[in-house]
Image (spheres, rainbow, N blue to C red):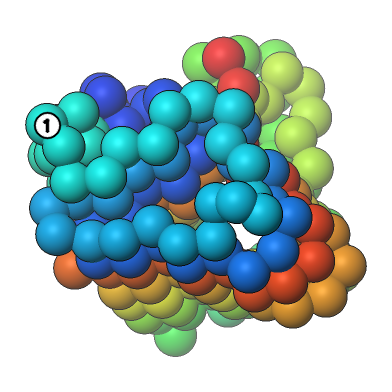
Amino acid sequence: MATLVPLGAASSYGVLANTAVTNTGLTVVNGDLGVSPAGAVTGFPPGTVTGTIHVNDAVAAQAQTDLLTGYLNALLQPVTTTVATELGGTTLTPGVYNALSGTFSLNGTLTLDAQGNPNAVFIFKATTTLITGATGNVNLINQAQSANVFWQVGSSATLGAGSTIRGSTLAFTSITATTGPSWTADCWLSVPPSRWTRTRSPCRPCPPAP
């Protein structure tokens, strides 16, 4: 059974990275934005942040420490079900999921069904990558909560233009939001060593909903 991944101080962040946060468009980050221990933030403005920007300070350092704890927690949770690489067009109930290929793709709608339990947890463990296409979408039903959805990614996560992904994405190497129409994500958290990059067009990453 999947259990809630503790994010601690990292839970207030919309974007958190280790080496760099780079933006080139009118991004709106709902929550804090941070980089630690020796990174840089560029592109804010024109991007805006509703919370506080923390650059190589003690607050960001604590968030990174808590993030690493959360990442390892997700990594070590036992897999309950192995599914296909492509998640689009499927409906899943609470659990810890991986794919034999070691990677996840999302082209179409993935429905997460909490079966009436607002505390139900969904964890997706990708050994390598998470890639969403323009039609990628995560739909939450029967009291499923964004705050209880976690994507543990062993290397890089890429969010395609126009896609919507729910939950917290914890990637070890990098997180990239690609050029195109607007996209929506809940929370991008990059585990050391890592970077976050967003190129062009409006987007709105935000922290997990309560």
Q: Is residue 122 left or right of residue 204?
A: left
Secondary structure beneath label 1: helix
Residue type (three-letter) at the residue carrying disc 1: Ala
**Total marks placed:** 1
Q: Does 201 appear above or below 208?
A: below
Image x and y of residue 187, in percent: 52, 42
> How many residues crowd mark 1 within 10 Å: few (<14), some (14–19), many (20+)?
few
Q: Is residue 197 left or right of residue 45?
A: left
Quadrant, the C terminus: top right
Residue 203: quadrant of the picture? bottom right
Q: Does 138 appear above or below 120?
A: below
Query: What residue do we see at 73% from left, 72% from top?
Result: 200
Image x and y of residue 125, in percent: 39, 60
Asked if residue 110 can be seen in this view, the reply is no
Query: What residue do we see at 30% from left, 61% from top?
Result: 40
Quadrant, the N terminus: top left
Of residues 94 and 166, which is closer to you in this image?
166
Query: What residue do we see at 74% from left, 55% from top?
Result: 26
Looking at this view, name the residue that lies furthest to the front: 45
Of residues 81 and 65, which is closer to you in this image?
65
Image x and y of residue 146, in percent: 61, 31
Looking at this view, name the residue that lies furthest to the bottom: 101
Image x and y of residue 124, in percent: 46, 55
Q: Is residue 111 left or right of residue 37?
A: right
The residue pinned by badge 1 equals 58
Query: What residue do we see at 18% from left, 46% from top?
Result: 56
Residue 133: quadrant of the picture? bottom right
Asked if residue 48 can be seen in this view, the reply is yes
